[in-house]
Amino acid sequence: MKILTRNQTSSTYYFLITVVSAVGILFSCSPKQGVAGTKTITAEHLAQGKVVFDNSCGKCHDLPNPSDHNAQDWVGIMNSMAPKAKLNEEQHQMVYDYIVSVK
């Protein structure tokens, strides 16, 4: 076991702090993956979401009324059901966008 001197320990400590700070700065300055409320959703996108919802979800059970749950509730529901329906990420997003758009 190698014992570090006080100087080496301080240098190691400052090096780690510098690395952690640099990583933090890089992540804080990187582009964000969408900001709530800024995404443009087209009518075609919503129509495709409805088709996937009707065909994929409706083949195993009666379809729930989208307005029976709020957007946050649908996150959990979709996260549990999308794998069972074998939805890819794009389909998952289309269905979610469709069901939260129904008022």
Image (cartoon, helix red, strand yellow):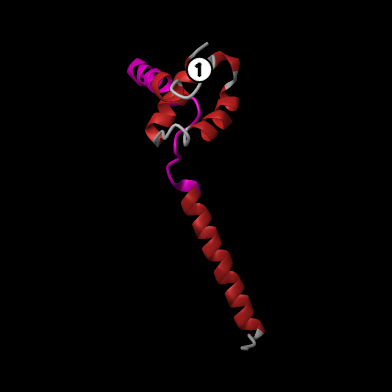
Report the magenta residues as a range: 28-53
Which secondary structure lies at badge 1?
Answer: loop
Residue drawn at point x = 37 percent, y = 19 percent: 51
Residue drawn at point x = 46 percent, y = 47 percent: 29
Compare residues 87 and 67 and report the one nearer the observer: 87
Most extreme residue toward the front is 60
Q: Percent x, y for residue 27?
A: 48, 50
36 is within the stretch colored magenta? yes
Q: Quadrant of residue 31?
A: top left
83 relative position to 69: left or right: left
Most extreme residue toward the right is 6
Q: Is residue 45 above or below residue 3?
A: above
Q: Percent x, y for residue 15?
A: 55, 71
The residue carrying pointer 1 sits among few (fewer than 14), some (14 to 19) or many (20 or more) residues within 10 Å by Cα, namely few
63 relative position to 48: left or right: right
Most extreme residue toward the top is 103
Disc 1 marks which residue?
A: 63
Give amino acid for label 1: Leu
Residue 91 seen in render: yes
Q: Quadrant of the N terminus?
A: bottom right
62 is within the stretch colored magenta? no
Residue drawn at point x = 56 percent, y = 29 percent: 77
Compare residues 22 and 47 and report the one nearer the observer: 47
Q: Percent x, y for residue 53?
A: 43, 21
Q: Percent x, y for residue 4?
A: 63, 85
